[in-house]
Every structure is written in structure tokens, then in C-alpha cells.
Amino acid sequence: MPDYKHSIPPETGLLVKEAALAAMSAWVAAIANNIKNPVAGIGAAIDILDRDLERLDGDTGVSLASPRETISRIKIRMSLLNEYVTELVDFAKPPNVFPARIELDPVISVIKEGIADLGADPETVQSGLTDDTHQITADEGRLVLILKSLVLNGIEAIGSNKKAKILIAAQRQYNGRSHGVLLSVEDNGPGFFDNVITHIFDPFFSTKEASTGLGLTLVKKYVDAHRGTIMISTSKSLGGAKVEMFFPD
Ligand SMILES: Nc1ncnc2c1ncn2[C@@H]1O[C@H](COP(=O)(O)OP(=O)(O)OP(=O)(O)O)[C@@H](O)[C@H]1O
Ligand SMILES: [Mg+2]
């Protein structure tokens, strides 16, 4: 006979989970707010320092190339920290997105630069845009976060034993209600494993040792905020994971 004394009904389990998530969101929001202002202040101070050094570089006989190089490295780390704070804030409350008609090519260039800053080969990322998909309706900052998160997931899944290939492609589509762009990110990794696929959008779910597990939770949250849809499948051309997102015009 099973021991029912210690089991809780599934609906109670769900409420406990929701309450825990609400408490966690409030906690994350408090941390994010406490670091947001100092991060912005440090960023502004570094910009001033950078401008001062640029001016002095021409005026003095001493080369300031080395400190300016250090400042540019600090700026890269600061922008990663800023992205992280944005993600924490967005996790804690519904994100405010401001979709506009934007160019996709510069966004893909930013993604390539971002992964180069992290030490990966920017040529890992290939762009497969069609003539009619160079523009998309999206919040540019959030689209960068979405694509960066998906590209990093691909690179992490492929690992170091194989040359990584990530394809960012797009096509125009009508989804029965609106016209828009179907944007996809696919890789040549092992694909989503069956035992993880039902959890990938759960906050803090990760199979990696040092990861937060907020990546896909936020990607879905951002796509939802654009009134879009997200689908997971296997890449036909590359064999690994494929994530497709529909962004209505
Ligand atoms: N391209 C992919 N191929 C195979 N598995 C993937 C891929 N992307 C995500 N996954 C699986 O889904 C899990 C959740 O991904 P998610 O991006 O939400 O978290 P994470 O990458 O583990 O952590 P974080 O994004 O916060 O650094 C991953 O831990 C991994 O197991
Ligand atoms: Mg991730």
C-alpha cells in the first residue's frame, strides 16, 4: 500500500511552486535594483575616463594605448553586466518591450561581436536572411538578448570537440492571423535531449554546472511580450537544435 500520508495533491504542489516563484521574483527584483544604479554610475564614469584619455592621448608625448585598451576591456565586461541586470529585472516582472521596424543585419553583427568578445569564433554564426527579411518588427535590445542567448546555447551544446555551426535564418510568414517574420536559430550540436525538452522553459532549469538556467525562460518571455510564438525542433540542415520564433509585423 502506498503511504498517502505524506503526499500532497498536485494542485497544492502547483500553488507551492507559484508561491516560491513569486518570492524568488521579489528577491531577484530587489537584487537587480540594488545593482542597477551603481552599474549605471560606474559605466558613466568609465565613459568620461575614456573620453579624457582620448583627449590626453593626442596632447601628451606619452602613449596611452595600453590604459585605453584596458578601458575597452572594462567596457565589454560592463556591457555584459548591464545585460545581466536587464535579464534579472525582466525575469522579476513582465518586460516592457518597444517593438519597431528594425534592420536584422546589424543585429546579427552585434551577436557576432558579442561572441567574439567571449572568445568564440564569430564565423561560427552564419546568416541566412532572404531578400524580404532584412527587416523585422522587434525591440532591438531584447532581440539581441534573445539571439545571444540562443547562439550561446548552441555553442555550449556543441562543445569543443567539433567545429561549431550556428545558422540564424529568417523567412516571411503568415500565421493565420498576422504577417510577420519567422526567425530561426539552429546548430550542429546534439539537439534537445528528450528528458530535458519538457523543462527547458522552466526558470532555473539547467543541465550545465555554472549556469543560471534563465536563458530560455527569458527568450520565451521576450517572444511572448512581442505577441509572438516560439517552437522547438531538430535542425534538418545541421542536425542539432532548432528554435523558431514568429515576430508579427
Ligand atoms: N541548442 C541546444 N542544444 C541542446 N540543448 C540545449 C540547447 N539549448 C538549451 N539546451 C538545454 O536546455 C537547458 C536550458 O537552457 P537555458 O538557456 O534556459 O539555460 P542554460 O543555458 O543552462 O543557462 P543560462 O542560459 O542561464 O546560462 C540547457 O541547460 C540545455 O540542457
Ligand atoms: Mg542558456
Image: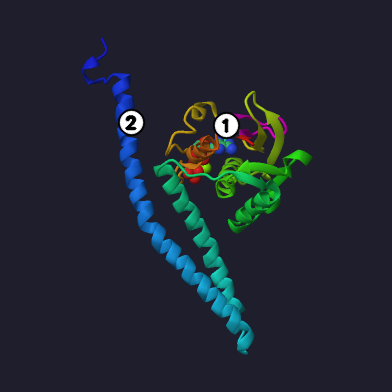
Question: Dot 2 lies on which element?
Answer: helix
Q: Main secondary structure of the magenta part?
A: strand
What's under tag 1, amino acid-wise?
Ile
Q: Nearer the viewer, mark 1 or mark 2?
A: 1
- Foreground residue among 132 and 189: 132
Location of the N terminus (image quadrant): top left
- Foreground residue among 52 and 211: 52
Write the start and end of the magenta stretch as one range.
Answer: 228-246
Q: Is residue 64 visible?
A: no
- The image position of residue 200, as x and y in percent, is 49, 33
Q: Is residue 235 magenta?
A: yes
The residue pinned by badge 1 equals 230
- The image position of residue 68, as x and y in percent, is 58, 75
What's under tag 2, amino acid-wise?
Lys
* Image quarter of residue 143: top right
The residue pinned by badge 2 equals 17
